[in-house]
Image (spheres, grey):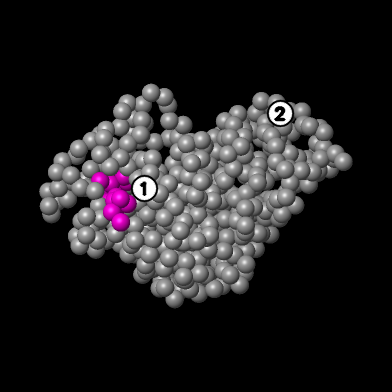
Amino acid sequence: MWWEQAVIYQVYVRSFQDTNGDGVGDLPGVTRRLEHIAGLGAQAVWLSPIYPSPNADFGYDVSDFCDVEPAFGTLEDLDALVGRAHELDLKVVLDFVPCHTSTQHPWFREHPDYYVWADAPVNNWRAAFGNSSWGRDEQTGRYFLHSFFPEQADLNWRNPEVREQMLGAMRFWVDRGVDGFRLDALDRLMKDPELRDDPPATRPFELPGDAADLELDHIHSRNAPDLGDALQAIRRAVGDVLLIGEVYLPIEEAAPYLETLDVVFNFEELFAVGDAAKLRAAIEAGLRTGGQGWVLSNHDFSRLVTRAGADNARAVELLLLTLPGPVFLFEGDELGFADTPMSGPELDRNHRDPFRVPMVWDSDAAHGGFSTADPWLHPDQAAAEGVAQQSADPTSVLTLTRQAMALRPRLAANETSLIPSAPGTIVLRRGDHIVAVNLGDSPQDAPPVAELVLEARPGDGADLRVIPAHGGWVARAPA
Ligand code: NOJ
Ligand code: CA
């Protein structure tokens, strides 16, 4: 399958490239920059939601599943993007949002039975961004379920009409030539039909979340046992296109989703990059489970450089890019973006603006070459040096990214295993290559290797008998 060892590049459309001078990135901008993505060595591009949206959650509150957000362009622009991507041998993955619609979607008034209603908040379920999952509809005085912002009403997937509508929307895009979907918030797709309370948690949840929500054991508010039926209906509707699940669960609990989906994101890894032991454990569990999408960063959480720490970021990036795929690279990861201090009003109520700042194409151009106009988000400073500047620098993060991605085909067919190593280090064997990184403060012994292939930082491979502090390398294993 094309995606098995793929690097999938995530484009946050609003922040990638503006072409019409309104300060908002658009689809023609993505098309214009596809050569950058192909030139990195990626196999696919994942577009953050492109549908019309009132932007309470910047595209994740959809008001029409079969059209393009006017600020991003038109259906014809999407067709042109898909056509150009395919010419460049890039697949196109759309972000699809099955769990909820905008409360501005016409369905919310015309088909209230598509949603979940009650006369009062009937249970203790919590929304992911805080507060009760029950929102009051001012027009009717009744309450509707929302797992995220109150502008995002949860669809009732137990209503067959809802299913047909959503499956039809996915087929609409497959017919236009898209090669896969990233399915949003899947653990929230199916809930307890009796709407029973979540009981108090008896053990810690491994992933970060809203404090009050973490006190509950989410056995009813999400992840209902018949979820597989819905997933299989999706699979039947779309055929064998790539299905990536955004399942916000620890690795083992997300595993059942892989009965139907091809890939789930490994969120444990994403949150573990600051701690070598935890990161190693997440990789080990992921390799055992299979079907893992390794994520450098995305539009929801702090950037890799911020989570891993500036000291260790290059070593962690090298490690993640050498894992058996698929790997998800978020725009700006290739330049080493860190969370960016912002000026101006906060636009995302869940504080995610610092990870979503515009791409920097050319540090010498106005607004980094992103737009001729004032961009929709206002970073205090450029998130990193631009593509033009880093391309000319053999020691840049961009050069490291390109080199690590170029190496992947040589690693692809090889068996992967973790080799026991000193605390603070992670050593991976991929057939005849050894990847060794050290996130600790002192150099550690390395396993025997033959010859240096790639260094995380210039000089890291000077003495291959050690894995340098905060560094690492890829080398050939002894014959
Ligand atoms: C996960 C998306 O990645 C995030 O950006 C969004 O806010 C929620 N799902 C709700 O759709
Ligand atoms: Ca624009």
Judge left or right: residue 375 versus residue 315: left
Expressed as whole percent of the image width and height from the top left, the position of residue 39 reads 65, 63
Which comes before the other along the chain, label 2 or label 1?
1
Q: Nearer the viewer, residue 403 or 213?
A: 213
Kind of residue indicated by mark 2: Pro
The answer to whether residue 185 is seen in the rendering is no
Q: How far apart are marks 2 and 1 (CA)?
A: 39 Å
Point out the frontmost of discs 2 and 1: 1
What residue do we see at 50% from left, 74% from top? Answer: 80
Expressed as whole percent of the image width and height from the top left, the position of residue 206 reads 46, 31
Judge left or right: residue 83 versus residue 54: right
Over which residues does the magenta segment extend? 145-160
Quadrant in the picture for the C terminus: top right
Magenta stretch holds residue 320: no
What residue do we see at 38% from left, 64% from top? Answer: 168
Magenta stretch holds residue 154: yes
Considering the numbered disc 2 on the image, is that residue within a helix, a strand or a loop? loop
Kind of residue indicated by mark 1: Leu
The answer to whether residue 2 is seen in the rendering is yes
Q: Residue furthest top?
A: 202
What residue do we see at 43% from left, 51% from top? Answer: 231
Judge left or right: residue 407 versus residue 90: right
What residue do we see at 49% from left, 49% from top? Answer: 260
Label 2 close to label 1 by CB (< 8 Å):
no
Q: Which quadrant of the view contains residue 45? A: bottom right
Q: Which residue lies furthest to the right in this view?
A: 479
Residue at image mark 2: 420
Quadrant in the picture for the N terminus: bottom right
Judge left or right: residue 241 versus residue 214: right
Where 397 falls versus 54 (above or below)? above
Expressed as whole percent of the image width and height from the top left, the position of residue 108 reads 23, 58
